[in-house]
Image (tube, helix red, strand yellow):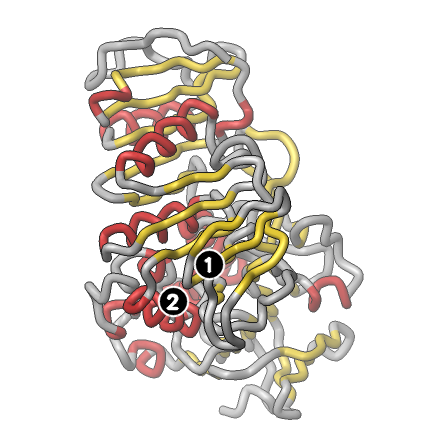
Amino acid sequence: MNPAQHPQGHAVIIGAGHAGGTLAALLRQYGHPGPITVVGGEDLPPYLRPPLSRAWLQQAMGPDELLPRPAGASADQAIALRPGMRAMAIEPGSRQVALNDGSVLHYEHLVIATGSAPRWLVLPGDERPGITYLRTMEDAQALRGHLQTARCLAIIGGGYAGLEIASTARKLGVQVRIIEREGRLLTRSASPQMAAHLLQLHAGQGVEVHFNAAVAAIQGDSPTRITALWMADGSRLECDAVLIGVGAAPCMELAQSLGLDCADGIAVDGEGRTAMNGIYAIGDATRRPLAGYPGLHRLESVPSALEQARRAACAITGSELPAHETPWFWSDQYDTRLQIAGLPGQGDQTVLRGNPASGRFAVLHLRGGQLCAAECVNSPGEFMAARKAIAATHCADPGFPTLPSKAPLTS
């Protein structure tokens, strides 16, 4: 069957990241009988992205290990992959998607899973090689090459990706300088207590962190060589490679062209439906409702993308919907694993369990006496208990089994 000519039941997925690739496989698993096509902008099948800032940079895993499914699995499930292709326009009246090669796909179900892209930082001197962003395999390959020869990596931005790359670079023996425009790390995604702990962790590994700092220009002694960052305060920080990690923006141009609500993400319901019949959106490009948290939220995490893929697959196939999951996230830095359940910024009280100096503790966030988030360092038992408690909207239990301390934190 040629899905371009036989649209009945055709599910077209724009985006081959975690959300899009998982959705395609689940549609088949849940019994979708029609054609399935995944349109991906990279010349690669769907692959795992979290290792790009960790094991992949250390050359501790090969390309095949980045594949979430065995080679040939998509073909075995009659899932058509269209790598290296971009969707240029959507015509909802005729249910068509125009691709950049001039071909047209007809659809019954269309899913926008376009993810997010790095926010660009325009600076004098940013045309030099040795400057990277990290979002794709190509980016990771370039950064891996820079880390093999660099003496000092400057990371502009103190978010999770930058901290993970700092950890990897230090393991490779590369000096690291982090430049953060705010007064602390992770201002939008972690509590002050957790940010302070991670700062201490990185400082203990020899990482320099510069707060309230802005880069004015990237300097070099030739068009192809970086030597330093020229700072807005007139100071100079030596480096010979630069990673820019100042956040990500949702890729929602296609949704915007349809007139959909796209205020910092495509607005969807709990199953990924947009306001337009037959069109869904999932993954990092969306804002969605979360059980227990008012409003719509845009989450940039693999677990969120996978949950959205499951719920959209159920909606499209008419399968029974799973229970809503508590949002969660993880980050590996050095020998430390941070696991977060819930949304830390939603609480009105903070409680510490354990001793941060031991390297094993949890920061609990309560709202009206109920647990709404937990940041857990090397404490998987606390993390799992917190996820269950948040999902059940239970009050925080001072008798959590593994860590005895619950000393209040000052705000």
**367 vs 331: above or below:** above
- Residue 135: x and y in percent read 47, 63
Local packing at callout 1 (Cα closer than 10 Å; few below 14, some 14-19, many 20+) is: many
Residue ID for mark 2 = 143
Q: Nearer the viewer, residue 56 or 91?
A: 56
Q: Nearer the viewer, residue 77 or 356?
A: 356
**50 vs 62: above or below:** above
Quadrant for residue 238, please give it. bottom left
Quadrant for residue 58, please give it. bottom left
Quadrant for residue 144, please give it. bottom left
Residue occupying image coordinates x 22% and y 71%? 62
Residue ID for mark 1 = 243
**Numbered tag placed on residue 131 in the rendering:** none
- Residue 23 shown left or right of residue 268 in the figure: left
At mark 1, the secondary structure is strand
C-beta proximity under 8 Å, tags 2 and 1: yes
Q: Amino acid at mark 2?
A: Leu
**397 vs 381: above or below:** above
Q: Amino acid at mark 1?
A: Leu
Residue occupying image coordinates x 38% and y 61%? 49
Query: How many numbered marks are there?
Result: 2
Q: Is residue 251 visible?
A: yes
Q: Is residue 20 visible?
A: no
- Residue 315: x and y in percent read 53, 56
- Residue 404: x and y in percent read 22, 11
**330 vs 284: above or below:** above
Residue occupying image coordinates x 27% and y 25%? 382
- Residue 230 shown left or right of residue 391 in the figure: right
At mark 2, the secondary structure is helix
